[in-house]
Amino acid sequence: MIELHLGGEYFFTTKLPVALRAGVWRDPAHSVEFRGPLTTPDAVAAAILYPKGESAMHFSAGLGLAWPRFQIDAAYDRSPHFRVGSISAVTRF
């Protein structure tokens, strides 16, 4: 299964360097799903527990600030099923 990602970054070289980022990707359905005949109660239970998954498109945006020895990044990812925000910090010794 192929998962394609497309992203870009624009870096402003100001006194405080700033990076703007954006991306998009298709997340194919990759969960376990039941595909057998519904001829027994166990098969019906398995079909309920393991339904067919759905593919989803993700859109993301991010911002990064960089100092000589420190960096902070923030990002947001949105899809039909999830909305995720994240923040990270990096220090260089």
Image: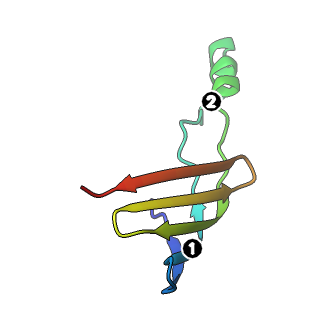
Please name the amino acid that badge 1 sits on.
Arg
Toward which corner of the image does residue 69 lie, by quadrant?
A: bottom left
Where is residue 81? Give x, y as percent: 73, 47
Q: Which mark is residue 21?
A: 1
Earlier along the polypeptide chain: callout 1 or callout 2? 1
Name the residue carrying label 2.
50
Q: Callout 2, which amino acid?
A: Tyr
- Which residue appears at 67% of the width and 34% of the height? 51
Q: Residue at x 64, y 57 (%)?
A: 77
Residue 24 in which image quadrant: bottom right
Q: Nearer the viewer, residue 39 or 41?
A: 41
Mark 1: secondary structure: strand
Pick out the residue farthest to the bottom. 13
Q: Residue at x 57, y 73 (%)?
A: 21
Residue shown at 42% from the left, 68% from the top: 67
Say above or below: 41 vs 16.
above
Q: Quadrant of residue 75?
A: bottom right
Task: Measure the alpha-carbon separation of dots 1 and 2.
Answer: 36 Å
- Left or right of 34, for residue 4: left
Query: Alpha-carbon neighbours of circle 2 within 10 Å: few (<14), some, or many (≥20)?
Result: some
User: Does 22 appear above or below 33?
Assistant: below
Total numbered circles: 2
Examine the rendering and report whether any part of residue 7 can be seen: no
Position in image of residue 42 (x %, y %): 63, 14
Image coords of residue 32 (percent x, y): 53, 36
